[in-house]
Image: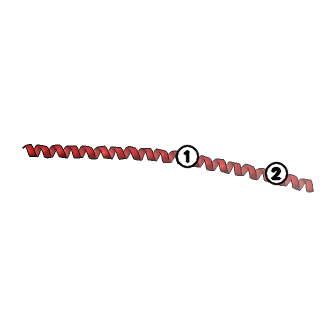
């Protein structure tokens, strides 16, 4: 009976270890996925920021050109 209990306890300990390892692996995978997603978002944010900046610069250049036309005329 004691041997059976010890065997059962060993099996439970092994199961617990396997479950913890799987949980840690899942957490690490989620962490990596989150990091990759965040990097993509940051890259897109920087891209959009540059597009907006370029748009503002274009508008300012057009406004300056328009003002110069009026001053010349």
From the viewer's side, name the closer residue of 71 and 43: 71
Mark 1 crowdedness (10 Å alpha carbons): few <14, some 14-19, many ≥20: few
Q: Nearer the viewer, residue 8 or 37?
A: 37
**Image quadrant for the C terminus?**
top left
Q: CA distance from mark 1 to mark 2?
A: 33 Å
Q: Nearer the viewer, residue 3 or 35?
A: 35
Q: Residue at x 50, y 46 (%)?
A: 37
- Determine whether, in the image, residue 1 is placed left or right of residue 14: right
The residue lying at 49 percent from left, 48 percent from top is 38
Q: Is residue 73 left or right of residue 36?
A: left
Residue 8's tag is none
From the viewer's perspective, is 72 left or right of 9? left
Residue 59 position, x and y percent, is 23, 46
Q: Is residue 55 left or right of residue 35?
A: left
Identify whether 55 is placed above or below 9. above
Which coloring applies here? secondary structure
In percent of width and height, residue 70 lies at 10, 46
Marked residue nearer the N-terminal end (1 or 2): 2
Pick the quarter of the image with the N terminus: bottom right
Q: What residue is pinned by disc 1? A: 33
**Which numbered disc, 1 or 2, marks the residue closer to the eye?**
1
Q: Which mark is residue 11?
A: 2
């Amino acid at each position: 009976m004691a041997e059976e209990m010890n065997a059962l306890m060993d099996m439970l300990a092994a199961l617990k270890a396997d479950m913890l390892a799987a949980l840690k692996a899942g957490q690490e995978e989620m962490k990596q996925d989150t990091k990759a997603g965040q990097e993509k978002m940051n890259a897109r944010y920087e891209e959009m920021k540059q597009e907006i900046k370029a748009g503002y610069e274009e508008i300012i250049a057009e406004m300056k050109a328009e003002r110069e036309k009026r001053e010349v005329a």
